[in-house]
Image (tube, rainbow, N blue to C red):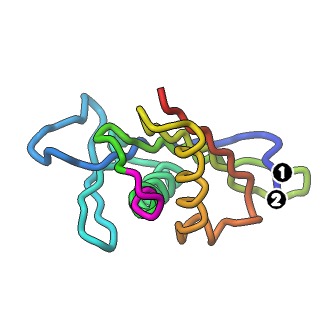
Amino acid sequence: MIKIEKVRYSGLAHTKVNRDPAVQRGEHGVVDIKVSAAGAKSYEFMAAELHPTIEQLFAGAWSACWITVLGAAASMKKVALPADTSVDLQVNMGETTSPAWSLGAKFTVRIPGVDQAMAEAIAHLAHQLCPYSQATKGNIEVVTEVITA
């Protein structure tokens, strides 16, 4: 697996299920991008800059897909996800030890009120189910932190 030695660019996405499409969440200089995934729910890639970077767009797409399969994974484990479940994904692009560039990713998954071991099992299953995770599997370093508090 390739690891980044020096991060040059970074993109962050905060994604959650959109429970109230009438609520504006963007602040000055940022926008909320509504995305959809197969299965019809509406998701939001929140607080994107007006001219998002490619790292931020990739983070937004991957995190929207990931939160979709997080719901599927929770359902498979017979757990109802709380309304404030969210996924933050930071995608970094940087130099490696060879004369090449690579990506890296860090997920911060928030599943408040769910038992830590169960939340980690759900996140692990979501990572196995997500097509973006499968596409990057073994190619880039991916770190996942699960927060239940």
The residue lying toward the viewer, choosing from 93 and 136, is 136
The residue that mark 1 highlights is 96
In the picture, the quarter occupied by the N terminus is bottom right
Task: Kindly give the residue lying farthest to the right in the view shown.
Answer: 98
- Which amino acid type is shown beneath numbered disc 1? Thr
Which residue is rendered at x = 75% and y = 64% of the image?
A: 139
Please say if 48 is above or below 54: above
Cα gap from disc 2 to disc 1, whole angstroms: 6 Å
SS at mark 2?
loop
Percent x, y for residue 146? 57, 38
Circle 2 packing at 10 Å, graded few (<14), some (14-19), many (20+), is few
Which residue is rendered at x = 45% and y = 38% of the image?
A: 114
Percent x, y for residue 79? 40, 52
Which residue is rendered at x = 35% and y = 50% of the image?
A: 80
- Which amino acid type is shown beneath numbered disc 2? Ala
The residue lying toward the viewer, choosing from 113 and 60, is 113
- On residue 67, which mark appears? none
The residue lying toward the viewer, choosing from 82 and 6, is 82
Percent x, y for residue 11? 53, 44
Please say if 67 is above or below 20: below
The residue that mark 2 highlights is 100
Instruction: Say whether marks 2 and 1 touch (CB < 8 Å).
Output: yes
Q: Is residue 78 magenta?
A: yes
Please say if 138 is above or below 104: below
Q: Is residue 84 magenta?
A: no
Which residue is rendered at x = 83% and y = 42% of the image?
A: 5
